Image (cartoon, grey):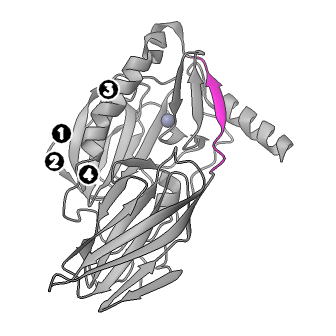
Amino acid sequence: MMAYRVLLLCLLLCAVPLTTTTTTTTAQEATPLPPPAAPAPVALLQGPGVTVELFFEQLQQGTMGLVRATGDIAEGRVLFLNRQYDFVRLGEAWYAFVVAAIDARPRDYTLSILLRSSAGTDSTFDRAITITSASFLNLNFSLPADRAFLTDPEVERNEFARLDVLIDAIRPERLWSAEGFQMPMQGEIISEFGQYRVLNQNVQTRHTGWDQQAPVGTPVAAMSRGEVVFADRLDIRGNYVLLDHGYGIFSGYAHLSQVNVERGQTIEKGQIIGLTGNTGRSSGPHLHWEIAVNGEWVDGMVFLRTWLPGEGSGSGLGSGS
Ligand SMILES: [Zn+2]
Protein backbone atom coordinates (compact mmCIF):
# COMPACT_ATOMS: atom_id res chain seq x y z
CA MET A 1 0.00 0.00 0.00
CA MET A 2 2.77 2.37 0.99
CA ALA A 3 4.78 1.66 -2.15
CA TYR A 4 1.69 2.19 -4.27
CA ARG A 5 1.06 5.54 -2.59
CA VAL A 6 4.61 6.73 -3.20
CA LEU A 7 4.47 5.68 -6.82
CA LEU A 8 1.14 7.41 -7.37
CA LEU A 9 2.39 10.56 -5.72
CA CYS A 10 5.43 10.55 -7.96
CA LEU A 11 3.35 10.02 -11.08
CA LEU A 12 1.04 12.86 -10.20
CA LEU A 13 3.87 15.23 -9.42
CA CYS A 14 5.76 14.36 -12.54
CA ALA A 15 2.67 14.57 -14.68
CA VAL A 16 2.05 18.23 -13.90
CA PRO A 17 4.56 20.13 -16.00
CA LEU A 18 6.12 23.21 -14.47
CA THR A 19 6.96 24.46 -17.93
CA THR A 20 5.26 23.84 -21.25
CA THR A 21 6.30 20.48 -22.62
CA THR A 22 5.32 18.50 -25.66
CA THR A 23 2.40 16.12 -25.25
CA THR A 24 3.52 12.79 -23.91
CA THR A 25 3.34 9.92 -26.38
CA THR A 26 2.03 7.58 -23.69
CA ALA A 27 -1.05 9.73 -23.10
CA GLN A 28 -4.04 7.57 -22.34
CA GLU A 29 -7.29 8.64 -23.91
CA ALA A 30 -10.14 8.86 -21.45
CA THR A 31 -12.48 6.02 -22.24
CA PRO A 32 -16.11 7.10 -22.71
CA LEU A 33 -18.10 6.07 -19.69
CA PRO A 34 -21.11 3.80 -20.10
CA PRO A 35 -24.37 5.48 -19.07
CA PRO A 36 -25.10 4.81 -15.39
CA ALA A 37 -27.77 2.22 -14.74
CA ALA A 38 -30.69 2.97 -12.44
CA PRO A 39 -29.65 1.69 -9.02
CA ALA A 40 -31.69 -0.28 -6.51
CA PRO A 41 -32.46 1.48 -3.24
CA VAL A 42 -30.50 0.20 -0.24
CA ALA A 43 -33.03 1.27 2.39
CA LEU A 44 -36.79 1.65 2.41
CA LEU A 45 -38.55 3.82 5.00
CA GLN A 46 -42.32 3.93 5.18
CA GLY A 47 -44.75 6.32 6.79
CA PRO A 48 -48.47 7.04 6.38
CA GLY A 49 -48.98 7.43 2.63
CA VAL A 50 -45.29 7.98 1.85
CA THR A 51 -42.29 5.83 0.96
CA VAL A 52 -38.69 6.98 1.13
CA GLU A 53 -35.90 5.17 -0.69
CA LEU A 54 -32.24 5.77 0.10
CA PHE A 55 -29.70 4.92 -2.57
CA PHE A 56 -26.75 4.97 -0.16
CA GLU A 57 -25.85 3.89 3.38
CA GLN A 58 -22.54 5.66 3.37
CA LEU A 59 -21.08 8.49 1.37
CA GLN A 60 -17.43 9.08 0.58
CA GLN A 61 -16.14 12.61 1.21
CA GLY A 62 -16.92 14.76 -1.86
CA THR A 63 -19.72 12.63 -3.30
CA MET A 64 -23.47 12.90 -3.82
CA GLY A 65 -26.25 10.56 -2.76
CA LEU A 66 -29.87 10.35 -3.91
CA VAL A 67 -32.99 10.22 -1.74
CA ARG A 68 -36.31 9.42 -3.45
CA ALA A 69 -39.75 9.92 -1.95
CA THR A 70 -43.11 8.88 -3.38
CA GLY A 71 -46.70 9.15 -2.23
CA ASP A 72 -48.87 12.04 -1.12
CA ILE A 73 -46.20 14.74 -0.90
CA ALA A 74 -46.66 18.51 -1.17
CA GLU A 75 -43.13 19.42 -0.13
CA GLY A 76 -40.15 17.97 1.66
CA ARG A 77 -36.57 18.45 2.67
CA VAL A 78 -33.52 16.61 3.93
CA LEU A 79 -31.28 17.91 6.69
CA PHE A 80 -27.72 16.63 6.60
CA LEU A 81 -24.40 18.09 7.75
CA ASN A 82 -25.78 21.57 8.47
CA ARG A 83 -27.32 21.88 5.05
CA GLN A 84 -30.94 21.72 3.93
CA TYR A 85 -31.81 19.97 0.67
CA ASP A 86 -35.26 20.59 -0.75
CA PHE A 87 -36.95 17.71 -2.52
CA VAL A 88 -37.61 18.44 -6.19
CA ARG A 89 -40.24 16.74 -8.27
CA LEU A 90 -38.96 14.81 -11.30
CA GLY A 91 -41.62 12.70 -12.99
CA GLU A 92 -43.64 10.65 -10.51
CA ALA A 93 -41.19 10.94 -7.64
CA TRP A 94 -39.49 13.53 -5.45
CA TYR A 95 -35.70 13.61 -5.19
CA ALA A 96 -33.09 15.25 -2.97
CA PHE A 97 -29.41 15.41 -3.97
CA VAL A 98 -27.49 15.10 -0.71
CA VAL A 99 -23.76 15.82 -0.53
CA ALA A 100 -20.93 14.72 1.77
CA ALA A 101 -18.65 17.77 1.73
CA ILE A 102 -15.06 17.27 0.63
CA ASP A 103 -13.85 18.25 4.13
CA ALA A 104 -16.54 16.48 6.21
CA ARG A 105 -14.96 14.47 9.05
CA PRO A 106 -15.42 10.72 8.47
CA ARG A 107 -17.93 9.41 11.05
CA ASP A 108 -21.67 8.75 11.41
CA TYR A 109 -24.15 11.60 10.92
CA THR A 110 -27.91 11.77 11.21
CA LEU A 111 -29.78 12.34 7.98
CA SER A 112 -33.29 13.69 8.67
CA ILE A 113 -36.06 13.56 6.10
CA LEU A 114 -39.15 15.72 6.52
CA LEU A 115 -42.16 15.32 4.25
CA ARG A 116 -45.47 17.22 4.27
CA SER A 117 -48.60 15.79 2.66
CA SER A 118 -51.20 17.78 0.72
CA ALA A 119 -53.37 17.77 3.86
CA GLY A 120 -50.50 19.22 5.91
CA THR A 121 -49.52 16.04 7.75
CA ASP A 122 -45.81 15.80 8.52
CA SER A 123 -43.71 12.62 8.39
CA THR A 124 -40.14 12.54 9.63
CA PHE A 125 -37.50 9.87 9.23
CA ASP A 126 -34.00 9.73 10.75
CA ARG A 127 -31.24 7.53 9.46
CA ALA A 128 -27.55 7.21 10.38
CA ILE A 129 -25.27 7.75 7.40
CA THR A 130 -21.53 7.07 7.53
CA ILE A 131 -19.19 9.45 5.78
CA THR A 132 -16.09 7.55 4.72
CA SER A 133 -12.61 8.91 4.07
CA ALA A 134 -11.62 9.36 0.44
CA SER A 135 -7.91 9.18 1.41
CA PHE A 136 -7.14 12.33 -0.53
CA LEU A 137 -3.46 12.87 -1.29
CA ASN A 138 -1.26 15.61 0.13
CA LEU A 139 0.84 17.35 -2.52
CA ASN A 140 3.35 20.20 -2.60
CA PHE A 141 3.45 22.33 -5.71
CA SER A 142 5.76 25.08 -6.90
CA LEU A 143 4.54 27.97 -8.97
CA PRO A 144 6.82 30.06 -11.20
CA ALA A 145 7.81 33.47 -9.78
CA ASP A 146 5.58 35.41 -12.18
CA ARG A 147 2.50 33.67 -10.76
CA ALA A 148 3.61 33.50 -7.13
CA PHE A 149 1.15 36.29 -6.19
CA LEU A 150 -1.60 33.73 -6.80
CA THR A 151 -0.56 31.86 -3.65
CA ASP A 152 -1.93 34.69 -1.49
CA PRO A 153 -4.54 33.04 0.81
CA GLU A 154 -6.71 36.14 0.35
CA VAL A 155 -6.88 35.55 -3.43
CA GLU A 156 -7.88 31.95 -2.70
CA ARG A 157 -10.62 32.92 -0.23
CA ASN A 158 -12.03 35.63 -2.49
CA GLU A 159 -12.34 33.37 -5.49
CA PHE A 160 -14.05 30.56 -3.58
CA ALA A 161 -16.42 33.11 -2.00
CA ARG A 162 -17.30 34.49 -5.43
CA LEU A 163 -18.04 31.01 -6.78
CA ASP A 164 -19.93 29.96 -3.64
CA VAL A 165 -22.54 32.63 -4.36
CA LEU A 166 -23.08 31.13 -7.82
CA ILE A 167 -23.16 27.44 -6.86
CA ASP A 168 -25.46 28.12 -3.90
CA ALA A 169 -28.15 29.57 -6.21
CA ILE A 170 -30.50 26.70 -6.94
CA ARG A 171 -32.61 26.98 -10.06
CA PRO A 172 -35.89 25.10 -9.56
CA GLU A 173 -35.89 23.41 -12.96
CA ARG A 174 -33.98 20.69 -14.76
CA LEU A 175 -31.82 21.97 -17.63
CA TRP A 176 -29.49 18.97 -18.04
CA SER A 177 -30.20 16.90 -21.11
CA ALA A 178 -32.04 13.60 -21.03
CA GLU A 179 -28.80 11.82 -22.00
CA GLY A 180 -27.12 13.01 -18.80
CA PHE A 181 -23.51 14.20 -18.55
CA GLN A 182 -20.29 13.46 -20.44
CA MET A 183 -16.58 14.19 -20.09
CA PRO A 184 -15.68 17.65 -21.45
CA MET A 185 -12.91 16.23 -23.67
CA GLN A 186 -10.58 13.27 -24.19
CA GLY A 187 -7.14 13.47 -22.65
CA GLU A 188 -4.86 11.99 -20.04
CA ILE A 189 -5.84 12.67 -16.44
CA ILE A 190 -2.93 14.34 -14.68
CA SER A 191 -4.46 15.29 -11.34
CA GLU A 192 -7.32 14.01 -9.22
CA PHE A 193 -10.16 15.56 -7.30
CA GLY A 194 -9.80 16.26 -3.59
CA GLN A 195 -6.04 16.61 -3.11
CA TYR A 196 -4.78 18.79 -0.28
CA ARG A 197 -2.29 21.11 -1.92
CA VAL A 198 0.38 23.35 -0.51
CA LEU A 199 1.59 25.90 -3.02
CA ASN A 200 5.05 27.45 -2.66
CA GLN A 201 4.88 26.43 1.03
CA ASN A 202 2.28 29.17 1.44
CA VAL A 203 -1.39 28.69 0.61
CA GLN A 204 -3.20 25.46 1.45
CA THR A 205 -6.04 24.51 -0.81
CA ARG A 206 -8.22 21.66 -2.01
CA HIS A 207 -8.40 20.43 -5.58
CA THR A 208 -12.07 20.83 -6.45
CA GLY A 209 -11.92 19.21 -9.88
CA TRP A 210 -10.03 16.91 -12.24
CA ASP A 211 -7.15 17.95 -14.51
CA GLN A 212 -6.67 16.62 -18.01
CA GLN A 213 -3.63 17.34 -20.11
CA ALA A 214 -4.32 19.07 -23.42
CA PRO A 215 -2.31 21.23 -25.79
CA VAL A 216 -3.46 24.88 -25.81
CA GLY A 217 -6.45 25.24 -28.13
CA THR A 218 -8.16 21.86 -27.58
CA PRO A 219 -11.98 22.21 -27.83
CA VAL A 220 -13.89 21.86 -24.54
CA ALA A 221 -17.46 20.52 -24.71
CA ALA A 222 -20.32 21.31 -22.34
CA MET A 223 -20.83 18.25 -20.10
CA SER A 224 -24.61 18.60 -20.44
CA ARG A 225 -27.25 21.17 -21.35
CA GLY A 226 -27.16 24.25 -19.16
CA GLU A 227 -27.12 28.01 -18.86
CA VAL A 228 -23.90 30.03 -18.66
CA VAL A 229 -23.85 31.76 -15.27
CA PHE A 230 -20.21 32.85 -15.45
CA ALA A 231 -17.88 33.47 -18.42
CA ASP A 232 -15.05 35.73 -17.33
CA ARG A 233 -11.55 35.81 -15.92
CA LEU A 234 -10.69 34.67 -12.39
CA ASP A 235 -7.30 34.93 -10.64
CA ILE A 236 -6.86 31.21 -9.98
CA ARG A 237 -9.09 29.55 -12.57
CA GLY A 238 -8.09 31.98 -15.32
CA ASN A 239 -10.64 32.22 -18.11
CA TYR A 240 -13.54 30.30 -16.65
CA VAL A 241 -16.99 29.12 -17.71
CA LEU A 242 -19.59 27.93 -15.20
CA LEU A 243 -22.75 26.20 -16.46
CA ASP A 244 -25.91 25.86 -14.36
CA HIS A 245 -27.65 22.56 -15.19
CA GLY A 246 -30.56 23.15 -12.83
CA TYR A 247 -31.59 21.76 -9.42
CA GLY A 248 -28.26 22.77 -7.90
CA ILE A 249 -25.94 21.00 -10.39
CA PHE A 250 -23.11 23.04 -11.99
CA SER A 251 -20.07 22.29 -14.16
CA GLY A 252 -16.99 24.53 -14.40
CA TYR A 253 -14.17 24.73 -16.97
CA ALA A 254 -10.93 26.54 -16.05
CA HIS A 255 -7.64 27.91 -17.48
CA LEU A 256 -9.21 28.39 -20.94
CA SER A 257 -7.30 30.23 -23.69
CA GLN A 258 -10.54 31.20 -25.42
CA VAL A 259 -14.15 31.48 -24.23
CA ASN A 260 -16.87 31.03 -26.87
CA VAL A 261 -19.95 31.71 -24.72
CA GLU A 262 -21.57 34.55 -22.81
CA ARG A 263 -23.43 34.75 -19.53
CA GLY A 264 -27.15 34.04 -19.99
CA GLN A 265 -26.72 31.78 -23.03
CA THR A 266 -28.23 28.29 -23.04
CA ILE A 267 -25.69 25.69 -24.15
CA GLU A 268 -26.48 22.25 -25.49
CA LYS A 269 -24.66 19.12 -24.32
CA GLY A 270 -21.46 18.71 -26.33
CA GLN A 271 -21.42 22.31 -27.58
CA ILE A 272 -17.88 23.77 -27.60
CA ILE A 273 -17.76 26.39 -24.84
CA GLY A 274 -14.11 27.34 -25.35
CA LEU A 275 -10.53 26.16 -25.90
CA THR A 276 -8.06 24.80 -23.35
CA GLY A 277 -5.20 27.00 -22.18
CA ASN A 278 -2.86 27.86 -19.34
CA THR A 279 -4.48 30.98 -17.83
CA GLY A 280 -4.74 31.66 -14.09
CA ARG A 281 -2.93 29.60 -11.43
CA SER A 282 -1.79 26.89 -13.80
CA SER A 283 1.66 25.39 -14.24
CA GLY A 284 1.14 24.03 -17.75
CA PRO A 285 -1.55 23.74 -20.43
CA HIS A 286 -4.43 21.62 -19.18
CA LEU A 287 -8.16 21.59 -18.56
CA HIS A 288 -9.42 21.73 -14.98
CA TRP A 289 -13.10 20.76 -14.86
CA GLU A 290 -15.27 20.52 -11.80
CA ILE A 291 -18.79 19.70 -10.64
CA ALA A 292 -20.75 21.33 -7.82
CA VAL A 293 -23.99 20.01 -6.33
CA ASN A 294 -26.09 22.13 -3.99
CA GLY A 295 -23.21 24.40 -3.05
CA GLU A 296 -20.50 21.75 -2.56
CA TRP A 297 -17.72 20.66 -4.93
CA VAL A 298 -18.02 16.94 -5.62
CA ASP A 299 -15.87 14.33 -7.35
CA GLY A 300 -16.79 14.79 -11.02
CA MET A 301 -15.76 11.24 -11.98
CA VAL A 302 -18.00 9.73 -9.30
CA PHE A 303 -20.75 12.13 -10.37
CA LEU A 304 -20.48 10.89 -13.99
CA ARG A 305 -21.05 7.33 -12.76
CA THR A 306 -24.04 8.33 -10.61
CA TRP A 307 -27.53 7.71 -11.90
CA LEU A 308 -29.68 10.83 -12.09
CA PRO A 309 -33.46 10.89 -12.34
CA GLY A 310 -35.00 11.97 -15.63
CA GLU A 311 -38.39 13.47 -16.19
CA GLY A 312 -40.07 10.20 -17.10
CA SER A 313 -41.56 7.75 -14.63
CA GLY A 314 -38.39 7.33 -12.63
CA SER A 315 -36.31 5.88 -15.46
CA GLY A 316 -32.65 6.77 -15.39
CA LEU A 317 -30.99 9.32 -17.60
CA GLY A 318 -29.38 7.48 -20.44
CA SER A 319 -30.00 4.17 -18.74
CA GLY A 320 -31.86 2.98 -21.82
CA SER A 321 -34.55 1.43 -19.67
ZN1 LIG B 1 -7.14 21.41 -11.45
State yes or no: residue 196 in magenta.
no
Which numbered tag is attached to residue 244? Answer: 4
**Circle 1 residue:** 262
Image coordinates of residue 214 in percent, x first then y, are: 50, 37
Instruction: Indicate whether 227 appears above or below 231.
Output: below
State yes or no: residue 140 in magenta.
yes
Which of marks 4 and 3 precedes in the sequence? 3
State which quarter of the image contains the C terminus: bottom left
* SS class, disc 4: strand
Image coordinates of residue 41 in percent, x first then y, are: 49, 81
Type of amino acid at the residue the image marks with label 3: Leu
Q: Does the Cβ of the disc 3 residue fall within 8 Å of ligand 1?
A: no
Which numbered tag is attached to residue 234? Answer: 3
For the residue pair 79 and 158, the one nearer the viewer reads as: 79
Residue 312 makes an appearance in the image: yes
Q: CA distance from mark 4 to mark 1?
A: 13 Å
Magenta span of residues: 134-142
**Circle 2 residue:** 265
**Does the residue at mark 1 contact the one at mark 2 (Cβ under 8 Å)?**
yes
Image coordinates of residue 320 in percent, x first then y, are: 42, 82
Which of marks 3 and 2 precedes in the sequence? 3
Q: Residue at x 28, y 32 (%)?
A: 162
